[in-house]
Image (tube, helix red, strand yellow):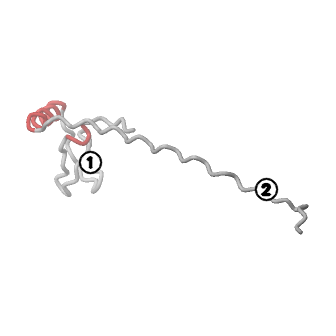
Amino acid sequence: MCFRPATVNQVDHKCPECGTNNLPEATMCARCFAPMTPLSEEDVAAQLAAKEAGMPAPAAPAAPAAPAAPMAPGAPAAPKDDNAVYF
């Protein structure tokens, strides 16, 4: 289970050099290390509001399927009798 904040994947903070999407608080690109200006809280809030206005709510995940019924065990093999007398 992931407890990462949802805003990490929703906010666009593209590097001006390579175009990599970075965290809003990044001061340098995670890929090319180019200097970047961190996004302000107002910029993040504005981006999230704009995306929420144009996007429907995400669907709830489906429930997992029930496991199959277990199989009945087979009969054990007959014990081998080494002292048996055969006629």
Q: Locate residue 12, reporting x and y percent.
A: 18, 44
Residue for badge 2: 79
Asked if the residues shown at circle 1 and circle 2 are in contact, with their CB atoms under 8 angstroms apart, the answer is no
Q: Locate residue 67, reporting x and y percent.
A: 44, 43
Q: In the picture shown, does residue 81 fall above or below 38? A: below
Residue for badge 1: 28
**Of the two numbered discs 1 and 2 in the rendering, the one whose residue sits closer to the viewer:** 2
Quadrant assignment, res 3: top left
- Residue at position x 62%, y 51% in the image: 74
- Residue at position x 70%, y 52% in the image: 76
Q: Nearer the viewer, residue 31 or 12?
A: 12
Disc tally is 2
Going by the numbered disc 2, the residue's amino acid type is Pro
Going by the numbered disc 1, the residue's amino acid type is Met
**Other residues around mark 1 within 10 Å, as few (<14) / some (14–19) / many (≥20):** some
Badge 2 marks a residue whose secondary structure is loop
Q: Locate residue 16, reporting x and y percent.
A: 16, 53
- Residue at position x 14%, y 30% in the image: 42
